[in-house]
Image (spheres, grey):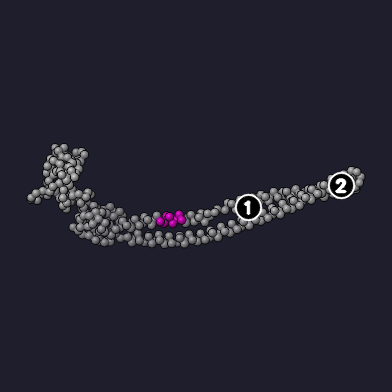
């Protein structure tokens, strides 16, 4: 029998048949639209996704602007904080240096006056008064040192806070919105695939064998709307021959054969063996003499030497000639 393939076109989901463009017996080409399903629900979901995407894109712009302004303000405030801390530190250090110079000069003066008092050349009361001033100035210098240390710590803290300000703060803020946009893009792709599935196309050149549902009726998921019968998957015109077990070892690839359509008169068609099944297996129903009784054998593919359109499923008588075919040798 001539090799043929039956394709059953069925929806992946239950849907109403909107249009049916072909009829039984009509020839169709691969990729030709043969029926369409109602896609209004999918179109509505696509519109919702598009509106949500528009909203999120607007939100993306708003978040970017708001974050840029906020980061700019924070950066300015931190810069001002660092500048103020630096200025306070410089002032404290300058004041401390003045106190240190005064303390050093007063310490030298106190030492000289102490020597003079020891030589009874100066009044001790002057030394006591100078010692009091010296002690007070020493206390002020200690306080100045403490203040400088505190301001150094403040400057370091202000600079650390400025360093922690993220350079990509805007990108971080936009992350959640972009994640939502990515989810929407995935939904849109899925809906586009579902919508494409509402257009049924012929998977191969062939003929519409049967139509099971009319426009307006609801098609059940997985059940065919129509079937298309096509020539086999190969480029050659092939006939499948069922050899019974007793004949299974007598045919070779490349052997010449004659193919004659059942009921035809005249010479048959020159052909040659292209494939031989690797093992003996149960034969299909149409090859059995009694469909109720299983039979075993081997399938052989025979290709016509010259192109001739074959009707899928058409029956033939095949004679194997026992010698190689010149066509197979080339």
Label 1 crowd (10 A; few <14 / some 14-19 / many >=20): many
Local SS, label 2: helix
The residue wearing badge 2 is 113
The residue wearing badge 1 is 158
Is residue 274 at all visible to an observer of this figure? yes
In this rendered view, identify the residue nearer to me: 86 or 81.
86
Is residue 282 at all visible to an observer of this figure? no
Q: Is residue 7 left or right of residue 180?
A: left
Q: Is residue 183 magenta-colored?
A: yes
Could you say which quadrant of the image residue 246 lies in? top left
* Residues at discs 1 and 2 in contact (Cβ within 8 Å): no
Q: Which residues are magenta?
A: 178-185
Of callouts 1 and 2, which one flags the residue occurring earlier in the amino acid sequence?
2
Q: Is residue 307 left or right of residue 150?
A: left
Could you say which quadrant of the image residue 274 lies in? top left
**Residue sitting at 20 percent across and 43 percent down?**
275
Q: Please tell me whether the stretch drawn in magenta is mainly helix, strand or loop.
A: helix
């Amino acid at each position: 029998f001539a090799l043929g393939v039956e394709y059953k076109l069925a929806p992946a989901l239950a849907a109403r048949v909107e249009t049916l463009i072909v009829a039984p017996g009509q020839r169709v080409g691969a990729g030709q639209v043969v029926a369409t399903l109602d896609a209004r629900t999918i179109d509505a979901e696509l519109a919702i996704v598009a509106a949500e995407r528009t909203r999120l894109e607007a939100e993306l712009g708003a978040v970017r602007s708001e974050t840029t302004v906020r980061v700019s303000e924070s950066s300015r405030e931190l810069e001002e904080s660092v500048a103020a801390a630096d200025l306070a530190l410089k002032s404290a250090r300058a004041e401390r240096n003045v106190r240190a110079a005064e303390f050093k000069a007063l310490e030298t003066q106190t030492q000289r006056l102490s020597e003079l008092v020891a030589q009874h050349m100066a009044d001790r009361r002057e030394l006591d008064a100078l010692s009091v001033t010296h002690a007070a100035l020493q206390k002020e210098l200690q306080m100045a040192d403490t203040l400088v240390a505190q301001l150094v710590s403040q400057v370091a803290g202000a600079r650390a806070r400025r360093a922690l300000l993220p350079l990509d703060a805007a990108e971080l803020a936009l992350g959640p919105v972009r994640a939502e946009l990515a989810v929407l893009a995935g939904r849109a792709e899925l809906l586009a695939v579902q919508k494409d599935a509402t257009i049924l196309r012929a998977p191969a050149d062939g003929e519409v064998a049967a139509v099971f549902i009319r426009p307006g009726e609801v098609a059940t998921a997985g059940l065919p709307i129509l079937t298309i019968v096509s020539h086999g998957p190969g480029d050659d015109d092939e006939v499948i021959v069922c050899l019974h077990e007793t004949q299974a070892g007598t045919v070779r690839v490349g052997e010449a054969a004659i193919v004659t359509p059942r009921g035809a008169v005249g010479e048959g068609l020159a052909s040659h063996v292209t494939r031989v099944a690797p093992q003996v297996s149960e034969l299909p129903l149409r090859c059995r003499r009694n469909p109720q009784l299983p039979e075993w054998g081997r399938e052989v593919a025979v290709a016509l030497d010259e192109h001739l359109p074959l009707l899928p499923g058409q029956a033939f008588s095949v004679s194997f000639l026992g010698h190689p075919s010149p066509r197979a040798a080339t």
